[in-house]
Image (cartoon, coloured by chain):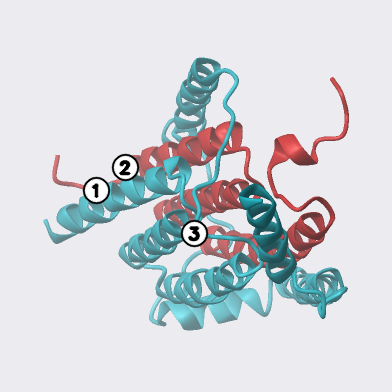
Chain colours: A cyan, B red
Amino acid sequence: MYEFIAFYVFAISTTILFLITVMSKNVLYAMTALAAGMVMISGLFFLLGAEFLGVVQLIVYVGAVMALYAFAMMFFDATKNIKEKHQNPTLVFLLGGLMALLFVLMFSAPIIGDNIQAIYPMIEGVGNAQAVGMVLFTKYLVPFEVAALMLLVAMIAGIILAGKKMDYSLTESESADEEMNIKKGDA
Amino acid sequence: MLEIGVNHYLILSGLLFSIGFMGVLRRKNLLMLFFATEVMLNAVNIAFTAIGNYYGDLSGQMFAFFVIAVAASEVAVGLGLLIVLYKKYGSVDLDVIASMKG
């Protein structure tokens, strides 16, 4: 009963928040809705018995990724609404609906397939974090190290890409241009 | 009816993935496009965890961890590229950035 209530609360709020993310015209609203939706998704992970994954979701997504987006938004003007030109909205919704149907069918395919065996079964008698550690550092050690290397490469790439011409301010020159235009308009 | 099975999670995951997919199709602002891809990655994580829970297998959670790691590095590199594009074009709108005719 509690699982039923919790699942529907998390599912409905996640869907609504992600719809706001996708439909909103304001970057700030979209980012806030995305962060809140990710918190709700971590609730779903806790419901599924994946406590460690839920905590990682909170720390990495809501903590690190959202902070990165928030810092990146300082480079752009987040207060004004973005203008987007939609050439064919009905086609987009038609394609989106078709893909939705396809994805639901694809994702519900394992319901039909019964002959799947667990390769790394859940270890009995230990908590989720301990079981995850056991599997991660034995069976998935090489992918884990490769992921570490990938994060290092991403960090260097991020620093080099964003760090170029850091002394040159984007917004100050932009506002100066706008002031110039206003003065020209007055004259 | 009150029993929550793997089907519920998978259908929710498909729904969220389609929301993200629709966002990728209709968004023209690159930052919003990144948000839509995050939605899609999160939807896939739910599916992985639900199937792993259904079969009593930890591999699903492992894949979700690696998806999170990939998403984190994608954001780091992507935002760096976004800032470079903004410095070059003064906008992150796809219609402004697009240089190929076709």
Q: Is residue B73 left or right of residue B21?
A: right
- At 53% from the left and 49% from the top, the residue drawn is B44
Give the amino acid at mark 2.
His
Q: Which residue is mark 3?
A: A79
Residue B76's spot in the image, x, y percent? Answer: 71, 68
**Tags 2 and 1 in contact by the CB under 8 Å rule?**
yes
Residue A54's spot in the image, x, y percent? Answer: 42, 70
Q: Which residue is mark 2?
A: B8
Q: Which residue is mark 1?
A: B4
Q: Is residue B24 above or below residue A167?
A: above
Same chain shared by disc 2 and disc 1: yes
**Tags 2 and 3 in contact by the CB under 8 Å rule?**
no
Q: Crowding near pointer 1: few (<14 within 10 Å), some, many (20+)? A: some
Q: Is residue A187 above or below residue B78?
A: above
**Tags 3 and 1 in contact by the CB under 8 Å rule?**
no
- At 46% from the left and 59% from the top, the residue drawn is A28
- Asked which secondary structure carries label 3, the reply is loop
Residue A40's spot in the image, x, y percent? Answer: 34, 61
